[in-house]
Image (cartoon, coloured by chain):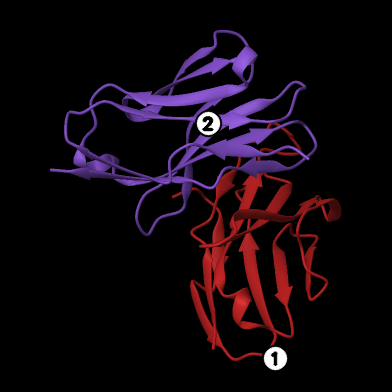
């Protein structure tokens, strides 16, 4: 069974700091990769996605992620975080078997 | 607003009871997914329906069942509830039958079992 690992459980940053969240998956076949975000008290929403093509994908709110196939990784980055980026971030992998597998999530707290 | 509607938003019940959670997918979406989010298990896929038919099953307990109706809304039935069933239950839908993994989530139903 495939698994998705997120390296950090909780990250605390100050505003304007750079953010990088790690994500690794175990499935060796063709996959679609996602980062979802859950703001406090809200539903999950898509931040960005990778299906194919340029391994560096840009999402909403200044986030980007890089797919490195050889490392089975899909790390999320933002050069300068804002207080409003405080949320829980989930990496997810779909290998076309009708199931989207999520990582455990990383809680990001941005201090003003 | 994702367009996915879930009711009720909050539910408190006792052990041994049965509850039904309801989900209306986005207009035009034929697939409905159910996920359970708890502190210790994270986000766990339960089950998926496509146009009324069960398509995939995940870590869904035998005490739980779901169905998707002709109008495409779905219900998740949880019975013989235990304390450990306390969680946030999310419904999600996807564009038609597309199996890309891009899901649109509802706001969830928070179940508390006392």
- The disc placed on residue A50 is none
Q: Residue B110 location, x and y as percent?
A: 51, 71
Q: Residue A12 location, x and y as percent?
A: 26, 43
Answer yes or no: are tags 1 and 2 on the same subunit: no
Element assignment for label 2: strand
Look at the numbered discs 1 and 2 and tell me whether their residues touch, using CB distance below 8 Å: no
Of the 4 image quadrants, the one containing the C terminus of chain B is: bottom right
Residue count near mark 2 (Cα–Cα under 10 Å), binned few <14, some 14–19, many ≥20: many
Q: CA distance from mark 1 to mark 2?
A: 39 Å
Q: Residue at x 61, y 76 (%)?
A: B84
Q: Residue at x 74, y 85 (%)?
A: B80
- The disc placed on residue B16 is 1
Residue that protrudes farthest toward the top in the picture? A54
Residue that protrudes farthest toward the left in the picture? A112
Element assignment for label 1: loop
Residue count near mark 1 (Cα–Cα under 10 Å), binned few <14, some 14–19, many ≥20: few
Q: Residue A63 location, x and y as percent?
A: 37, 25
Q: Residue at x 46, y 53 (%)?
A: A43
Q: Residue at x 63, y 63 (%)?
A: B23
What is the chain identity of the residue bearing mark 1?
Answer: B
- Chain in purple colour: A
- Chain in red colour: B
Q: Which residue is mark 2?
A: A23
């Amino acid at each position: 069974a495939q698994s998705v690992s997120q390296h950090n459980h909780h990250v605390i940053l100050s505003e304007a700091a750079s953010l990088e969240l790690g994500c690794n998956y175990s499935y060796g076949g063709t996959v679609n990769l996602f980062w979802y975000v859950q703001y406090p008290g809200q539903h999950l929403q898509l931040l960005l996605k990778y299906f194919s093509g340029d391994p560096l994908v840009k999402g909403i709110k200044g986030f980007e992620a890089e797919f490195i196939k050889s490392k089975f990784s899909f790390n999320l980055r933002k050069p300068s975080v804002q207080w409003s980026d405080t949320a829980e971030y989930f990496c997810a992998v779909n290998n076309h078997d009708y199931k989207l597998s999520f990582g455990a999530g990383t809680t990001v707290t941005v201090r003003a | 607003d994702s367009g996915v509607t879930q009711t009720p938003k909050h539910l408190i019940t006792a052990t041994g009871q049965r509850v039904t959670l309801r989900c209306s997918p986005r207009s035009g979406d034929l697939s409905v997914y159910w996920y359970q989010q708890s502190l210790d298990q994270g986000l766990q896929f339960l089950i998926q329906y496509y146009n009324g038919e069960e398509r995939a099953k995940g870590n869904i307990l035998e005490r739980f069942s779901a169905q998707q109706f002709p109008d495409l809304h779905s219900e998740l039935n949880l019975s013989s509830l235990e304390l450990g069933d306390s969680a946030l239950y999310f419904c999600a839908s996807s564009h038609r039958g597309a199996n890309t993994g891009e899901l649109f989530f509802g706001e969830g139903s928070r179940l508390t079992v006392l």
